[in-house]
């Protein structure tokens, strides 16, 4: 008997809330700003339908791309081909810098004026000096433009 009375109570509460919800919706629809908004929506329904169609197509394409394992593997392979030479070059430069640092620490000799003049004849030193000069010129131009 208590189950029946609790069922009746639940039904009464649901009916009361449903009857309260209906006037709320009707009251909302009677507001002028809501009616204006509905009018704007109805006027723009063709555009909205077209936008939804385009978004649905874009979503379908994105889903098919995201679930295509062959495409994902191809993209991964392409990225590896692009990144691998860069990482190889970066490792090579880092290794050369470490080796140069070790050599510079291992050789305690002082470089004098004649040693410096001899070094200036080295093509790598010339290349580095030209690069340094060009770099400083560019920095100077940028500071003047500020």
Image (cartoon, helix red, strand yellow):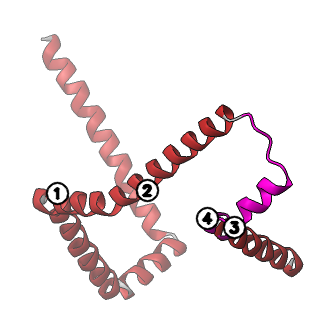
Distance from the alpha carbon under mark 4 to that under mark 1 = 42 Å
Q: The magenta stretch spans which residues?
A: 108-126
Is residue 4 or residue 110 the one in the foreground? 110
Distance from the alpha carbon under mark 1 to that under mark 3 = 51 Å
Residue 129, quarter of the rendered image: bottom right
Q: Earlier in the sequence, mark 2 or mark 3?
A: 2
Residue at which label 1 appears: 73
Structural crowding at the residue carrying mark 3, measured as other residues with C-alpha within 10 Å and reported as few (<14), some (14–19) or many (≥20):
few
Q: Earlier in the sequence, mark 4 or mark 1?
A: 1
Q: Say if 99 sits above or below 53 in the image.
A: above
Structural crowding at the residue carrying mark 1, measured as other residues with C-alpha within 10 Å and reported as few (<14), some (14–19) or many (≥20):
few
Residue at which label 4 appears: 124
Does the magenta run of residues contain 144?
no
Structural crowding at the residue carrying mark 2, measured as other residues with C-alpha within 10 Å and reported as few (<14), some (14–19) or many (≥20):
few
Between label 4 and label 3, give the one nearer the viewer: 3
Residue 73: % across, % down: 16, 57
């Amino acid at each position: 008997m208590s189950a029946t009375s609790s069922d009746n109570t639940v039904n009464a509460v649901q009916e009361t809330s449903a009857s309260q919800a209906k006037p709320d919706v009707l009251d909302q629809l009677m507001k002028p700003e809501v009616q204006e908004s509905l009018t704007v929506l109805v006027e723009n329904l063709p555009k909205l339908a077209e936008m939804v169609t385009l978004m649905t197509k874009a979503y379908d394409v994105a889903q098919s791309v995201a679930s295509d394992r062959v495409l994902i593997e191809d993209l991964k392979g392409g990225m590896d081909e692009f990144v691998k030479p860069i990482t190889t070059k970066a490792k090579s430069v880092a290794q050369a810098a470490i080796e140069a640092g070790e050599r510079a620490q291992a050789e305690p000799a002082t470089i004098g004026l004649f040693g410096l003049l001899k070094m200036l004849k080295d093509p790598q030193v010339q290349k580095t000096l030209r690069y340094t000069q060009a770099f400083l010129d560019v920095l100077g131009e940028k500071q003047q433009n500020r």
